[in-house]
Amino acid sequence: EAQVTQNPRYLITVTGKKLTVTCSQNMNHEYMSWYRQDPGLGLRQIYYSMNVEVTDKGDVPEGYKVSRKEKRNFPLILESPSPNQTSLYFCASSHLTSGPTDTQYFGPGTRLTVL
Amino acid sequence: GQQVMQIPQYQHVQEGEDFTTYCNSSTTLSNIQWYKQRPGGHPVFLIQLVKSGEVKKQKRLTFQFGEAKKNSSLHITATQTTDVGTYFCAEAPYNDYKLSFGAGTTVTVRA
């Protein structure tokens, strides 16, 4: 089954404790990205990757890191989480044509709470 | 930042009625994608519009791209309880790899 998986689905942590949210896709997609969803703000792109070892900042990259060492995986790293990073996070992937114009497949989401 | 503005933010609809949600931009859009997110779920791709004036239909849903490519609309006829959720529009610019989403229209249905 074609899918995007994220782990963990729920996480409660404390300020400053490094954490990683994993994302994996089995569709051989070149393009992967991370979004955060906050009430009234919709989905805001954090980082995206066009292929292995190629990443770039989205609209809200501060406080986040990513890596793309393998095509299928795109982990999101919070080196020192703060309460304003409490949010619902989605990973997504798609084939890459001339831009991310192909269908975006979203993971189930990770609800993060930073105390 | 967000390039597309969605209105209304909330839409309360009587079951069986029609409604329309809009996506507007001050600049010309490369394309428009529409997504639906059910409560507690993740966004699911509905459709993409690319051409000026393009109209596409999916059963009771009609999607339209404006002639000037600065706005788009989603019209739902005979609303059902299954239409509950948040509808997002997004632009994927051809000269960029970022994807910009609107804030969404959250739809509730009164039975």
Image: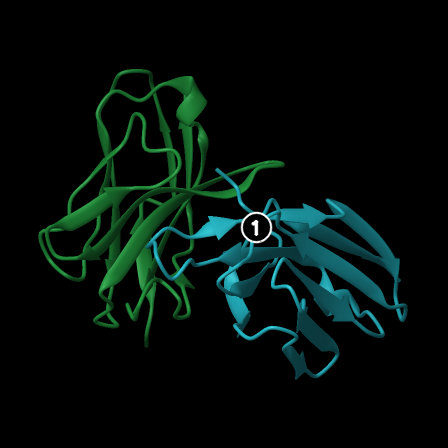
Q: Quadrant of residue A2?
A: bottom left
In the rendered structure, the answer to whether residue B109 lies left or right of residue B37 reads right
Q: Nearer the viewer, residue A78 or B29?
A: B29
Q: Position of residue A60 (x, y in %)?
A: 38, 33
Q: Nearer the viewer, residue A67 or A54?
A: A54
Look at the picture and state if B12 lies above or below A89.
below
Instruction: Check disc 1 and report the residue beneath it.
Output: B27
Q: Position of residue B22 (x, y in %)?
A: 72, 56
Q: Quadrant of residue A56?
A: top left
Identified at 18% across, 55% down, the residue is A73
Look at the picture and state if A75 lies above or below A15.
below
Colour chain A appears in: green
Look at the picture and state if A102 lies above or below A44.
below
Q: Position of residue B102 (x, y in %)?
A: 58, 48
Look at the picture and state if A37 lies above or below A98.
above
How busy is the neighbourhood of tag 1: few (under 14 within 10 Å), some, or many (20 plus)? few
Identified at 62% across, 47% down, the residue is B26
Identified at 31% across, 58% down, the residue is A5
**Quadrant position of the N terminus of chain A in the picture:** bottom left
Residue type indicated by callout 1 = Thr
